[in-house]
Amino acid sequence: MNSKDTASGSYNQVADTETSIDDLGIDLVPPSQQTKKPAELFFVWCAANIGVLGVVYGAIIVSFGLSFFQSVLAAIVGVASFSLVGISSIAGKIGRTTTLTLSRSSFGKRGNIAPTAFCWVNLMGWEAVNIITGTLTLAALFAALGFEETTIITALSLVLFGGLTVVVSMLGQNTVLFMQKWITRTFGAMTLFVVLYLMATADWAVIMALPSGSWITGFLPAVSIIAAGTGISWAIAGADYSRDQSPSSSKKDIFTSVVGGAGLPLILLMFTGILLTAQIPDLASNENPISAIGRLLPSWMAIPYLAAATAGIVTIAVLSLYSASLNLLSMGIKLKQRTAIALDAVLVLGIALYVLFVSGDFLGPFISFLVFCGVFLAAWAAIFITDFYTKHQQAGYSEEELYGETGTIKPTLLCWIAGSISGLMVTNTGFIDGPFAVGIFADSSLGLFVSFIVSMVLYRITLKTTR
């Protein structure tokens, strides 16, 4: 096959038997390497969502003033957004390349640079979140071992966790997938044990007495926050891990493996966070929520749990770094993949240093980041899935529209921009306040839904008028 966008940016022949998935960059996966089964996607997405941050999500849901029943329902509905990742994973099997390379079919190669750049920024932000969460988890582990929580311990935790993440990133995708299977099983089993412990020790009277909140200004914003942090954020990476699926892998099995792999740990972890709020009411606003969780558990449970959680976050961080490096290639930035990973790592470590040692506030900027990025990503996701179901589900993707000089498809780009701006206009992100973020839109993140719907409707109209 002709390799048009390799990791080094060169134009050369790629031998099917000599090139690993890590060396392909954003090239089409050769048929000889399409050997993976849907079950492997289950472990990929389970590992990507089994971090302790899911516990914090549960506390964030309750902070919207919801009852226990409403909180659990919000968690389930929010996680259903992983259907978007399931769809982009199906597209990956059909298109045999990365998600943002497939996106060229609707935006054009040059026009795709703008949404891809934003997706790269989103992944960089998520990588910073993972580094920060991993550092706080490792610091909480040191505290559980008897060390005093100091700046030096936090700095040491950052160096150890950041270094471990970069090293694991260099090992290659197959090695990471092997690690993910065992980490998923270990941390998953320990999380289940912690949940059972919390259920046995929880103050159920307090939990069940939580008053019901507004379905419009409480429930929907909570759902949108979870959707922004889960399915919407990961939709841009679905095809990155399914492009080497076997032709015999069914769409149903791919979709079920992806959604099930992500949904099971996320719901379990968020349920844990909901239970914890009865004992740690300020968990969602705690400066170090991970440490607060560690202090609540007995040391014999906290030490192995936090150790397994640290390993789990490493694999999550590796996934973000890997997809971010592929996005650079999709934009035409010609770097070897390992060089791209190293560059991304330096950038996110800088962000982590600022949050951990200068601002001191983690959850505030985190939620603002989710809302702001979610508006743009929701608009892109609406266009991507509409384009897939309308044009490519049966016909597939042509090599010309993915790698040819297709320029900019202006109507599609305008649909994305219009949807994103519409969402921003009704959203308060913490640093950009929309002029129409009043009433039910005040202090909520409903702009994600607005962005998604506007882009989808406009793009559907565009497709009909250009036929």
Image: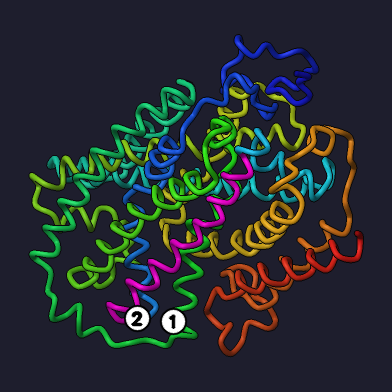
Q: Mark 2 to mark 1: distance in Å?
A: 7 Å
- Name the colour scheme: rainbow
Above or below, 129 against 61 in this view is above
Residue 316 location, quadrant: top left
Q: In the rendered structure, find residue 218 and report the number of the disc placed on it.
A: 1
Other residues around mark 2 within 10 Å, as few (<14) / some (14–19) / many (≥20) = many
Q: Nearer the viewer, residue 236 or 261?
A: 261
Give the amino acid at mark 2: Leu
Part of the protein shown in magenta: 66-92
Q: Is residue 117 left or right of residue 253?
A: right
Residue 392: x and y in percent read 73, 47
Q: Is residue 162 left or right of residue 447?
A: left
Give the amino acid at mark 1: Gly
Q: In the rendered structure, find residue 262 and report the number of the disc placed on it.
A: none
Q: Is residue 38 left or right of residue 449?
A: left
Residue 249: x and y in percent read 52, 37
Q: Which residue is mark 2?
A: 66
What predominant SS class does the magenta segment belong to?
helix
Q: Is residue 401 magenta?
A: no
User: Marks 1 and 2: in contact by CB < 8 Å?
Assistant: yes
Asked whether residue 51 is in view, the answer is yes
